[in-house]
Image (tube, rainbow, N blue to C red):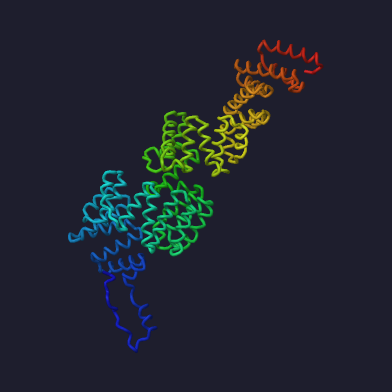
């Protein structure tokens, strides 16, 4: 309608009107609605329409354009309310029900959208909308029914591609988008969709190249800039990603509102969780990733119960959701020593790692490694971790798990090297780290370093456990000097007969090593001192034997 004018409102200029004055006249004219719509200035269109409404100039056509402008400004609530007002008129065009259903859909009111869409006339738009709603309802039978009604037209094919994207069938979506682009090179926005698919496939450099095609023409696009920032985050770091948003935040164009929540969400991610508890909770179930990132934030801050509660009612449908379900169950299972949770975690990891779409991805291989880790099949763990270690050279979390698997398979020299490369203080103070490094030192014939690790610890149940490990491993490796020292401390802390037996055996072993010249003779004095710390009657006999040897060999004890 607004493009139907076939002749100019003013005839060709006569000799009395110059082109300059005509331009001046044009400037003085009140702006027209069609100018705002053609220029996609929806803020201007809404302002004009609301001004007209205040002046009493309101009809169904004006309301339709008001709702249209609000919808394109992503003010779906305003558009919904306007369409609802229009439907109060008995003469209202039934197609308005479809437009209202679109507003409901974007507001996440899927039940209302379904009901409104069915009231509208049968059309391609209705089929596309019901197609998407079937996906939201996880109604596979209904989805396939609407799928069959799709035609080989651009709108229907774009709709099909978007469903492929939502179902993580990224390559199928790319194939459709590329086919449309071959015939319609002017549809530049499709490049953004292609780039989003490549991003999901972890091809961040390819994604960057494709999205740049669109940004060269529309540098102020919020969606494209956001994608570019996400690529920078994956390829470089959070600071590089945040830099992409700076210009966008300074301009704050009318289009910014469309993705304001998304930008806020991603800035928290780029800043490594800063402000997560303020930004993420209101966005849970608005932006799909908000819940997942809030779970990650809780896990990083050791609030495992909060992370579990956020995920417990989630029915996973994407690899990321399956992985997080596995992680929270594994973390809770380890914290509460729950075999049930560990079993659930192992099953989730196996589902992702064994799936055709994920088995050759880095997360897929990490999942299989985690699955075998929980099953304690460490040879298999190493097969998967070795295949991806080049991608995690300086990753402390990866190296910590890698080292534990190496220890479990007896590769102590490599495990020691990996453990010492870890810089994260939280890991370095963790009992699992200290115990594995202690074992590596002992197995690599460096018991003194293991003893020094124990001495640096504060007295606690963990230091007691480490002392037990040190005592037993040193004994097993015939490192009797430090085995004796460890059993001596254990016996003083807990007068248990087993610790006396360990100390007695270690002292006798050390005595034999001194006799054979494997240890310095000066250690005899320390052996006697440790034996005297025990009240067991066997001590006197052992000391007599040692003193006799010392006297014969002129050693002062």
Q: Residue furthest bottom?
A: 15
Image quadrant holding the N terminus, namely bottom left
Identify whether 262 is placed above or below 303: below
Q: Residue furthest left?
A: 90
The image position of residue 484, as x and y in percent, is 67, 21
Q: Is residue 239 left or right of residue 57?
A: right
The image position of residue 383, as x and y in percent, is 52, 36
Q: Which residue lies at the image location 48% right of the left edge and 57% below the top edge?
A: 209
User: Which corner quadrant of the image does residue 556 belong to?
Assistant: top right
- Foreground: 351 or 136? 351
Image quadrant holding the C terminus, namely top right
The image position of residue 136, as x and y in percent, is 31, 47
Identify whether 43 is placed above or below 471: below
Q: Residue furthest right?
A: 554
Identify whether 299 is placed above or below 503: below
- Foreground: 479 or 71? 479
- Foreground: 167 or 485? 167
Q: Is residue 331 in view from this perspective? A: no
Q: Which residue lies at the image location 63% right of the left edge and 18% below the top edge?
A: 502
- Foreground: 105 or 478? 478
The image position of residue 169, as x and y in percent, is 38, 47
């Amino acid at each position: 309608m607004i493009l139907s004018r076939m002749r100019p409102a003013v005839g060709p200029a006569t000799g009395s009107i110059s082109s300059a004055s005509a331009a001046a006249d044009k400037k003085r004219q009140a702006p027209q609605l069609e100018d705002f719509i053609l220029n996609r200035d929806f803020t201007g269109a809404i302002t004009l329409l609301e001004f007209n409404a205040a002046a009493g100039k309101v009809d169904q056509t004006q309301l339709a354009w008001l709702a249209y402008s609000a919808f394109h400004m992503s003010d779906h609530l305003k558009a919904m309310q306007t369409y609802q007002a229009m439907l109060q008129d008995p003469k209202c065009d039934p197609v308005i029900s479809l437009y209202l259903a679109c507003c409901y859909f974007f507001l996440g009111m899927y039940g209302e959208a379904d009901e409104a869409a069915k009231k509208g006339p049968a059309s391609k738009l209705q089929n596309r909308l019901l197609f998407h709603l079937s996906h939201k309802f996880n109604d596979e039978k209904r989805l396939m029914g609407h799928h069959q009604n799709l035609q080989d037209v651009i709108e229907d094919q774009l709709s099909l591609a978007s469903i492929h994207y939502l179902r993580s069938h990224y390559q199928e979506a790319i194939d459709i988008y590329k086919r449309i682009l071959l015939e319609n090179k002017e549809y530049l926005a499709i490049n953004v969709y292609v780039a989003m698919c490549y991003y999901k496939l972890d091809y961040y450099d390819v994604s960057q190249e494709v999205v740049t095609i669109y940004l060269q023409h529309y540098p102020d696009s919020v969606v494209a800039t956001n994608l570019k920032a996400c690529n920078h985050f994956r390829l470089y770091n959070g600071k590089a990603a945040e830099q992409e948003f700076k210009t966008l935040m300074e301009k704050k164009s009318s289009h910014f509102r469309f993705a304001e929540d998304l930008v806020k969400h991603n800035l928290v991610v780029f800043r490594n969780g800063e402000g997560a508890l303020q930004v993420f909770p209101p966005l849970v179930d608005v932006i799909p990733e908000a819940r997942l990132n809030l779970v990650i934030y809780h896990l990083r801050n050791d609030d495992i119960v909060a992370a579990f509660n956020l995920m417990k009612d989630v029915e996973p449908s994407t690899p990321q959701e399956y992985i997080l379900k596995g992680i929270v169950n594994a973390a809770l299972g380890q914290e509460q020593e729950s075999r049930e949770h560990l079993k659930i975690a192992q099953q989730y990891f196996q589902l992702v790692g064994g799936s055709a779409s994920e088995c050759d991805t880095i997360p897929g291989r990490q999942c299989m490694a985690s699955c075998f880790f929980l099953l304690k099949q460490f040879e298999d763990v190493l097969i998967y971790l070795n295949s991806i270690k080049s991608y995690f050279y300086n990753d402390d979390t990866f190296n910590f798990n890698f080292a534990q698997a190496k220890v479990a398979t007896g590769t102590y020299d490599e495990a020691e090297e990996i453990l010492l490369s870890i810089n994260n203080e939280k890991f370095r103070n963790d009992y699992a780290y200290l115990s594995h490094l202690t074992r590596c030192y002992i197995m690599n014939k460096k018991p003194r370093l293991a003893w020094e690790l124990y001495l640096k610890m504060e007295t606690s149940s963990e230091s007691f456990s480490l002392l037990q490990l040190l005592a037993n491993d040193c004994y097993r490796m015939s490192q009797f000097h430090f085995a004796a020292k460890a059993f001596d401390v254990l016996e003083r802390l807990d007068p248990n007969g087993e610790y006396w037996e360990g100390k007695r055996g270690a002292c006798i072993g050390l005595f034999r090593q001194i006799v054979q010249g494997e240890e310095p003779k000066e250690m005899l004095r320390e052996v006697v001192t440790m034996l005297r710390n025990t009240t067991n009657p066997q001590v006197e006999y052992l000391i007599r034997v040692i003193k006799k040897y010392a006297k014969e060999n002129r050693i002062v004890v």
